Amino acid sequence: MGLTLFLVVMLLVGVFIMGCSLFIKKETLESSVTNGTDDWYEIIFVLLFFVSPVIGKRILLFLFGLGWSAIFAYALISGNY
């Protein structure tokens, strides 16, 4: 039960990220910063995020939220946990 609740909460976090990507103010999105990264895919994502215009940042943030939700939805639906 506890793990199922955790998966549902993480699924809702992904939906929240997708909602934020659609409704966040332009100034807030332009001034966002991240801390250091460890992995190569994080470095690529951060570089793409800083170089892209606002619409690109919105798309990247939406895709991140979609991927996040998809991973936890798959785990919740398939029961592979």
Image (cartoon, rainbow, N blue to C red):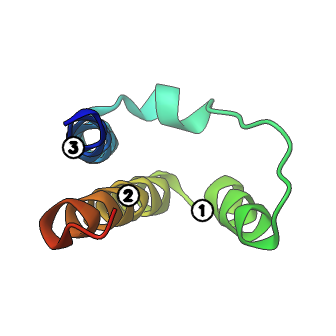
Residue 59 percent coordinates (x, y): 38, 62
Amino acid identity at mark 3: Thr
Instruction: Find disc 3 in the rendering and name its residue.
Output: 4
Residue 2 percent coordinates (x, y): 27, 33
Give how far apart the Cα atoms at labels 2 and 3 are: 16 Å
| The disc label shown at residue 24, or none | none
Amino acid identity at mark 2: Trp
| Closer mark to the observer between disc 2 and disc 3 | 3
Can you say which quadrant of the picture contains the N terminus? top left
Instruction: Find disc 2 in the rendering and name its residue.
Output: 68
Q: Nearer the viewer, residue 28 or 11?
A: 11
Residue displayed at 54% across by 57% down: 53
Q: Residues within 10 Å of mark 2 (few under 14, many from 20)?
A: some
Amino acid identity at mark 1: Ser
**Horizontal relation, residue 48 to residue 54: left or right:** right
Dot 2 or dot 3, earlier in sequence: 3
Label 1: element kind: loop
Label 2: element kind: helix
Label 3: element kind: helix
Give how far apart the Cα atoms at labels 2 and 1 are: 21 Å
Dot 2 or dot 1, earlier in sequence: 1
Q: Nearer the viewer, residue 29 or 40?
A: 40
Instruction: Find disc 1 in the rendering and name its residue.
Output: 52
**Horizontal relation, residue 53 to residue 62: left or right:** right
Q: Nearer the viewer, residue 38 or 8?
A: 8
